[in-house]
Image (cartoon, helix red, strand yellow):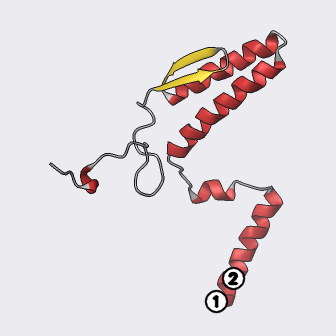
Amino acid sequence: MKHSSNSRRSRNGRNGNGRRSGNIKTKVFDSNGPDVRIRGNAMQVHEKYVALARDASSAGDHVLAESYLQHAEHYQRLINEFTPKKHTPSQQLDTGSKEERKTLTESKKTKQLEMA
């Protein structure tokens, strides 16, 4: 019996638009880092690599610490990829110095007066 290609599940963990599919919070990762094997969700694996990096750094092995931090960065990127980004207008105004916000507000007012 021949199966249609549309009904088959993707084996590469990505959906049609090239992005990974699935719930990152519940997905269990099996990480093979340098000298250690860690299993858990992305947040747990990230925290474990950061702790290992801290321990290696305090022990004086800065090369191993940097390696652990690179592994931690990978899992942080996975977390960031699936975390929804929330932007509100008040957060956008909070960026920059007080003078920049004042200038931005003044320029908005002049544009509104020009349009009237």
Secondary element under disc 1, as helix, strand or loop, is: helix
Looking at the image, which residue sits at the far left?
1
Q: Quadrant of residue 73?
A: top right
What residue do we see at 75% from left, 73% from top? 106
| Amino acid type, label 1 | Met
Q: Residue 61 placed where, x, y %?
A: 82, 14
Q: Residue 74 placed where, x, y %?
A: 63, 35
**In the figure, is residue 38 to the left or right of 58?**
left
Looking at this view, is 12 or 27 the one in front?
A: 12
Q: Mark 2 and mark 1 in contact (Cβ < 8 Å)?
A: yes
Q: Quadrant of residue 102?
A: bottom right
Looking at this view, is 53 or 32 the one in front?
A: 32
Residue neighbourhood size for the residue with mark 2, other residues' Cα within 10 Å, grouped as few (<14), some (14–19), many (≥20): few
Looking at this view, is 100 or 18 the one in front?
A: 18
Looking at the image, which residue sits at the far front?
1
Cα distance between the residues tagged 1 and 2: 6 Å
**In the figure, is residue 42 to the left or right of 36?**
left
- Residue bearing mark 1: 115
Secondary element under disc 2, as helix, strand or loop, is: helix
Looking at this view, is 94 or 33 the one in front?
A: 33
Q: Quadrant of residue 105?
A: bottom right
What residue do we see at 36% from left, 46% from top? 10
Q: How many numbered discs?
A: 2
What residue do we see at 40% from left, 38% from top? 23
| Amino acid type, label 2 | Lys
Q: Residue 36 placed where, x, y %?
A: 62, 15
What residue do we see at 80% from left, 55% from top? 97
Residue 97 visible somewhere in the drawing: yes
Q: Which quarter of the rendering shows the C terminus?
A: bottom right
Q: From what the image shows, is residue 98 above or below residue 47?
A: below
Q: From what the image shows, is residue 49 above or below residue 106?
A: above
What numbered label is drawn on residue 111?
Answer: 2
